[in-house]
């Protein structure tokens, strides 16, 4: 039987964390948990929480630690996390990582997918997503089989408001200032593995699989 995987995926926005999370999720039959997706669902639902967090995400800022920590606590308590999970986009600050430790969550692997800022800016221009089912695509690197519609559910594909180039620039600054220090945090625990993001999706997938198996 494959070993238990409690995996954190680190990396700048647009580095390919979400795509790798989906692939690993299928391979290991464990849930991929994206705090960004949970937050987008909250915003779409029009809830009070959604209204509060929208002001941060629309500017490319991080949602306050206390809010995302509560979200992740509730999500990790669900039964489907018992045999492992993948965290895509959490933790994003040192206090969030410390909160995982305080919750007694044992992390087995941390993979940082590294892509240069200039390449991120180019890639983000082609990102598309499905508002209805959350599937993600890229016009060049991961096109939908249904063209400008979602290949899963047929919904017209959208561009995320926070993929606007000016917002992406802010998100990269936030990433370098607040999230990148986590590499050191997990390096010190002996958990960090680096994957250099490749132009071709399947090449990044192969390197990620090797990092997990090696
Ligand atoms: P993502 O889809 O992971 O790029 O997340 C989209 C947006 O949701 C981010 O730009 C943040 O505003 C917010 N967000 C997602 N995860 C976190 C987190 N762990 N901490 C703070 N904000 C987050």
Image: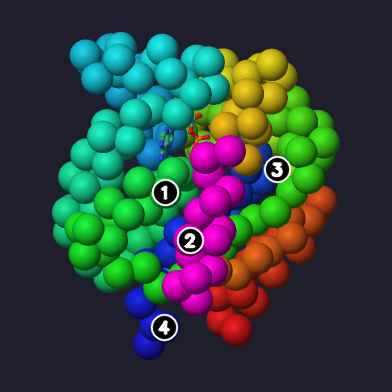
What's the distance in space between the residues labelled 2 and 1, CA to CA?
8 Å
The image position of residue 155, as x and y in percent, is 51, 23
Task: Please tell me the numbered disc located at residue 17.
Answer: none
Q: Are marks 2 and 1 in contact (CB under 8 Å)?
A: yes
As drawn, the label of residue 2 is 4
Q: Which residues are magenta?
A: 177-190
Q: Quick check: 112 left or right of 155?
A: right
Mark with earlier residue (1, 3):
1
Q: Nearer the viewer, residue 191 or 32?
A: 191
| Foreground of the two, 136 or 155 | 136
- Is disc 2 in contact with disc 3, using a CB cutoff of under 8 Å? no
**Residue 44 colored magenta?**
no
- Callout 4 touching callout 2 (CB < 8 Å): no
Q: Residues within 10 Å of mark 2 (few under 14, many from 20)?
A: some
The residue at 43%/64% (across/down) is: 7
Q: Which residue is at a point 81% across and 39% down the rendered structure image?
A: 119
Q: Which structural element holds mark 1?
A: helix
Distance of label 4 from label 2 (alpha carbons): 26 Å
Type of secondary structure dominating the magenta stretch:
helix
Residue that mark 1 sits on: 94
Distance between mark 2 and mark 3 Cα atoms:
32 Å
Q: Where is residue 27 drawn, in percent x and y?
A: 48, 68
**Mark 4 or 1, nearer chain start:** 4
Q: Quarter of the image holding residue 1?
A: bottom left
Q: Position of residue 208 (x, y in %)?
A: 63, 67
Q: Earlier in the sequence, mark 4 or mark 2?
A: 4
Q: Earlier in the sequence, mark 3 or mark 4?
A: 4
Disc assigned to residue 142: 3
């Amino acid at each position: 039987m494959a070993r238990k995987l409690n995996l954190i995926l680190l990396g700048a926005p647009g580095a390919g964390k979400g795509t790798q999370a989906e692939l690993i999720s299928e391979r290991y039959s464990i849930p991929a948990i994206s705090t960004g997706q949970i937050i987008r669902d909250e915003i779409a639902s029009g809830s009070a929480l959604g209204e509060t967090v929208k002001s941060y995400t629309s500017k490319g800022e991080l949602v306050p630690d206390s809010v995302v920590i509560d979200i992740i606590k509730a999500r990790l308590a669900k039964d489907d996390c018992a045999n492992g999970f993948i965290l895509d986009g959490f933790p994003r600050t040192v206090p969030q990582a410390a909160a995982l430790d305080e919750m007694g969550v044992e992390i087995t692997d941390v993979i940082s997918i590294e892509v240069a800022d200039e390449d991120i800016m180019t890639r983000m221009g082609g990102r598309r997503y499905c508002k209805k089912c959350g599937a993600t695509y890229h016009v060049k690197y991961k096109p939908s089989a249904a063209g400008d519609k979602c290949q899963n559910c047929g919904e017209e594909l959208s561009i995320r408001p926070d993929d606007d180039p000016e917002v992406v620039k802010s998100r990269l600054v936030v990433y370098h200032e607040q999230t990148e220090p986590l590499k050191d945090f997990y390096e010190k625990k002996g958990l960090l593995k680096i994957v250099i993001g490749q132009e071709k999706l399947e090449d990044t997938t192969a390197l990620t699989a090797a990092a997990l198996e090696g």
